[in-house]
């Protein structure tokens, strides 16, 4: 995952939805950090490394949703404090990458 962060938490006003085979999470905007090629979020549920997931990111300005997939590369924490999950996007199309960049940078303007 890139060390350069595109936007801090709160850049999305809608929930972020994360789907795995056995879990579906709706994450609050303030619990997610979007990077150039990945995402970090807090979760009440642990995920194993290399778990494949699909995500739906909703634009704060009504520009539609971005559907993408990713792989968990790190999950740390405990059931008492929650889990910090890091994912890297996989197979992100150029169009989806452009929309993601537009959504992330829109919060800066």
Image (spheres, rainbow, N blue to C red):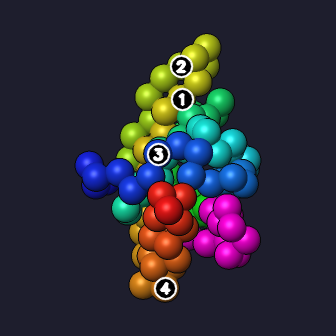
Q: Residue 8 bears which disc, if any?
A: 3
- How far from the left and from the top, in percent, is residue 57? 63, 62
Sooner in the amino-acid sequence: mark 2 or mark 4:
2
Sooner in the amino-acid sequence: mark 3 or mark 4:
3
Sooner in the amino-acid sequence: mark 1 or mark 3:
3
Sooner in the amino-acid sequence: mark 1 or mark 4:
1
Q: Nearer the viewer, residue 75 or 93?
A: 93
Overall secondary structure of the magenta section: strand
Q: What is the spatial separation of the Cα atoms under label 1 and label 2, in whole angstroms? A: 6 Å
Q: Residue 83 bears which disc, if any?
A: 1
Q: What is the spatial separation of the Cα atoms under label 1 and label 4, in whole angstroms? A: 31 Å
Sooner in the amino-acid sequence: mark 3 or mark 2:
3
State the SS at label 4: helix
Magenta stretch in the rendered image = 57-72
- How far from the left and from the top, in percent, is residue 22? 70, 49
Q: Which residue is mark 4?
A: 95
Above or below for 105 versus 50 = below
State the SS at label 2: strand
């Amino acid at each position: 995952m890139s060390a350069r962060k595109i936007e801090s938490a709160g850049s999305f006003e809608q929930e972020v939805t994360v789907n795995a085979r056995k879990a579906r999470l709706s994450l609050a905007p303030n619990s997610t950090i979007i990077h150039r090629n990945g995402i970090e979020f807090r979760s009440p549920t642990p995920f194993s490394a290399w778990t494949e997931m699909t995500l739906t990111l909703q634009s704060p300005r009504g520009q539609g949703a971005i559907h993408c997939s990713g792989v968990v590369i790190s999950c740390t924490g405990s059931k008492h404090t929650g889990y910090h999950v890091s994912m890297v996007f996989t197979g992100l199309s150029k169009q989806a990458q452009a929309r993601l960049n537009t959504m992330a940078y829109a919060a800066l303007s």
